Image (tube, rainbow, N blue to C red):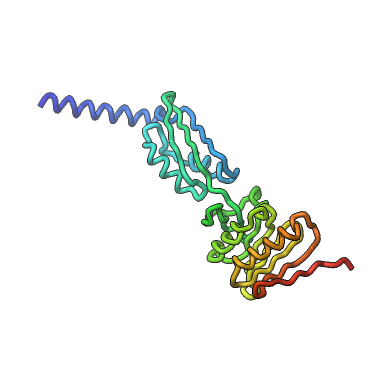
Amino acid sequence: MFVKYRVMCSLICTFVVLFFCYWFGLLAFSYIEISGDGEKAAGDSVERSIRDWKGLHFLTRSDKIARFLQKSAWVDHVEVYKSFDGGLRLTLGYRVPVLRSISGRFLVDSGGHLIDVYVSDDLLRLPIFDGDVHSARQAYRLWSRLGVWKGRVLSMICDEFSGWEVLFDNKVTVRLGGRNLVDRLDLFLKVAEHWSLQESNQEQVFDMRYNKSFSHKVATKE
């Protein structure tokens, strides 16, 4: 009976000590270090989440911290380390955006998945995707096949009537239509390599909406 009483007193004292330590901020991390390569918007989002988490302290379980951070639309994976000097080290892997919606409501990442965030000013350099959410996966499929042309895309437009159209930064427009998109795009890439189109800066249109063929039009100066 006496032993049981001592155990209960010990537990109560431990609880009281932890409560006062938490109340007076004695359990707070001495520092929080966040590392990982990603967009500025991604890092800012994580820092804001950590800053706003009022209940975060040294006794918070590492797996709980990881689950909390993985709720962010930007975070792909998290590694959590607690140091003996009272610090918290977070190593994060961020999702990489490759396309942005023209509405500014979402991004498409390098795996073809949506990043449900508003497009910030620092991401306006990304190619524009104009279409609904359901077309985003098709836009990614086309973008992923572009090879050396990936970094030259300005926009990928999906029109209800004329289908897909891709515009590159050297004034080359490729019209793909609404079917056989992969075959048509692959045909353009073969032509582009054969004609050394990457070196061209002349406004021209490739209409690939034919049966294993295409038309080509070069803009003329008046």
Task: Give the percent coordinates (x, y) of residue 143.
Answer: 61, 58
Left or right of 216 in this view: 6: left
Q: Is residue 32 above or below residue 117?
A: above
Left or right of 19 in this view: 179: right
Quadrant for the C terminus in the image: bottom right
Question: Observer-nearest residue: 197 or 126?
Answer: 197
Q: What residue is at 60 percent from the left and 61 percent from the top?
A: 142
Q: What residue is at 43 percent from the left and 32 percent from the top?
A: 81
Q: What residue is at 58 percent from the left and 54 percent from the top?
A: 118
Task: Give the percent coordinates (x, y) of residue 207.
Answer: 71, 70
Task: Give the percent coordinates (x, y) of residue 70.
Answer: 45, 46
Q: What residue is at 73 percent from the left and 60 percent from the top?
A: 194
Quadrant for residue 56, please give it. top left
Q: Is residue 76 above or below residue 26?
A: below
Task: Pick out the residue farthest to the front.
Answer: 194
Quadrant for the N terminus in the image: top left
Question: Observer-nearest residue: 205 or 53?
Answer: 205
Question: Observer-nearest residue: 103 or 191?
Answer: 191
Question: Observer-nearest residue: 194 or 130?
Answer: 194
Task: Pick out the residue farthest to the right.
Answer: 222
Task: Give the percent coordinates (x, y) of residue 25.
Answer: 42, 30
